Image (tube, rainbow, N blue to C red):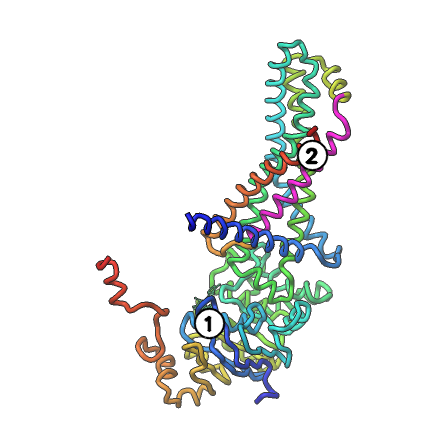
Amino acid sequence: MASTSIVEIENMTFKRGERTIYNNVSFQIPRGKVTAIMGPSGIGKTTLLRLIGGQLRPDSGTICFEGQNIPELARSELYKVRHKMSMLFQSGALFTDMTVFDNVAFPIREHTKLPKEIIRTMVLMKLEAVGLRGAKDLMPSELSGGMARRAALARAIALDPELILYDEPFAGQDPISMGVIVRLIQSLNQALGLTSVVVSHDVQEVMSIADYIYVIANQQVIGQGTPEELRQQESPLVQQFLQGQADGPVPFHYPAAEYSSELLEYARS
Amino acid sequence: MISFFQKVGANSLDNLGSVGRATFMLIGALVSKPTPIKSFPLLMKQIYMVGFLSLIIVVVSGLFIGMVLGLQGYTILVDFGAESSLGPLVALSLLRELGPVVTGLLFAGRAGSALTAEIGLMKATEQLSSLEMMAIDPLKRIIAPRFWAGVISMPLLATIFSAVGIIGGYLVGVKWLGVDDGSFWSIMQAAVDLEDIWNGLIKSIVFALVVTWIALYKGYDSIPTSEGISRATTETVVHSSLAILGFDFVLTAIMFGA
Ligand SMILES: Nc1ncnc2c1ncn2[C@@H]1O[C@H](COP(=O)(O)OP(=O)(O)OP(=O)(O)O)[C@@H](O)[C@H]1O
Ligand SMILES: [Mg+2]
């Protein structure tokens, strides 16, 4: 698989202070495919996207994008690499002082010298794709959470990057726009050959669009495979996550002292 | 006792660290090859936000402070029959001290706090991160134009403050209390050197650098939560005000001291 992967992570360890988020993990993201990353909340999925984007540096190990080791790149090289990727932030992160139209036009205006008319056409196409052409003159503060995320999605695909990192694209969407986004990710992927990395806990949607899935927990990749393979897997960790059971080998709780002793602590003192 | 020294030590290390980070931020923002076509509209927008929108508070304050100076100065001078010296009294107080200092304090409260809150919120809502991911350096795109806007606007505002203040002093002294019109202006002209104007201007440039830098750094370094941003905004006003008063003493000592 090595030659066909766009991102290769090897023996990567990342810590937040004392807490290890990733412990010596390795995996690849195949080019031209939709790869999903699933895992319980707070496990480090957003962190992983930021590591791939070069906003965070791992404590050890390599993260290669098209053969270049991201953590070792100089700033200017990193910026060059970032021209080829884009990220949909969990919060949308629209620029609040611009209209939806200007938000989507922003990366195009910054990085190309295209004439106004073409930029307008490009922006309208992207907005049409996410169903927000009618909202182009609204300010981000006038959008609902789901609309803001779709506008951000339009901005993320504005320059047709090679790799798109989607952080929770389905959160806060109604079933209709959820379906629209699922189809959008698929069609971008098939028509333009983009590579997509989708971080999400919506098991159903992820199973329906992903070509390959990694399940993360306990600082490791605990399961991987195509949706079919994953369903067949016997690993209790993976099954617990896919079926959404609170109790099982994957802890639902943030690491803590034992519950009863913490409750009693006050009484004792 | 030891823990007291530990605290002091840790605090000073913290402060040293933030001076270092602030310096890195500023260097990162300002050192680059100039791109006038892209930067100019950004700069103009910020001069509008930072400078023009502070104009009203500066003009109104200048007018009232000039009028108070005229009134207070007159009541003192008239006892010595020296009320014709009201002109230089008003002009020199404004040009040397009150213009730069009061404008600096107003600027910290009006524009500095707004800058900190704006940048802190941009950080909290991941706008700065998303610029980064678009391969656009937020230091150059967000920090640099705001810095230059502050540095350009504040000396202009201080000049306007002094000019309006002198008019305020004139209105009270001459029009109301009856100081002689001709001597008000002519004695003022004779007493005010070009050096006074320069020194006031230098002060206001120094204050502008300090206030804008503090405001931008506090926003950029803020903890991206509502509490963190509110603390950063308060710190901007407090630290800038103290810095202005401290630097004012130092600069005055250098310029006018023995
Ligand atoms: N700025 C930070 N400083 C310290 N710790 C952080 C910071 N950001 C995140 N963390 C920690 O890193 C862990 C992973 O965070 P991350 O945002 O990657 O989780 P996530 O998997 O994206 O969760 P979710 O599904 O809820 O978005 C969390 O447990 C959090 O406590
Ligand atoms: Mg997340």
Q: Which residue is mark 1?
A: A44
Label placed on residue B254: 2
Tell me if residue A210 comes above or below residue B131 in the rendering: below
Who is closer to the viewer here, B44 or A222? A222
What secondary structure do most residues of the magenta stretch adopt? helix
The subunit carrying tag 2 is B
From the top left corner, tell me how far across and down residue A233 is, in percent: 39, 89
Quadrant of the drawing holding the C terminus of chain A: bottom left
Q: Nearer the viewer, mark 2 or mark 1?
A: 2
- Quadrant of ligand 1: it is bottom left
From the top left corner, tell me how far across and down residue A253 is, in percent: 34, 70
Tell me if residue A129 comes above or below residue B255 in the rendering: below
Tell me how far mark 2 sits from mark 1, CA to CA.
55 Å
Magenta part of the chain:
B191-219
The quarter of the picture where residue A133 lies is: bottom right
Who is closer to the viewer here, A12 or B161? A12
Horizontally, is B65 left or right of A25 in the view? Answer: right
| Residue A52 within the magenta-colored segment of the rendering | no
Q: Secondary structure at mark 1?
A: loop
**Marks 2 and 1: CB-CB under 8 Å?**
no
Characterize the local packing of mark 2: few (<14), some (14-19) or many (20 or more) Cα atoms within 10 angstroms.
few
From the top left corner, tell me how far across and down residue B53 is, in percent: 61, 41
Horizontally, is B36 left or right of B15 in the view? Answer: right
Label placed on residue A181: none
Characterize the local packing of mark 1: few (<14), some (14-19) or many (20 or more) Cα atoms within 10 angstroms.
some
Q: Is residue B170 visible?
A: yes
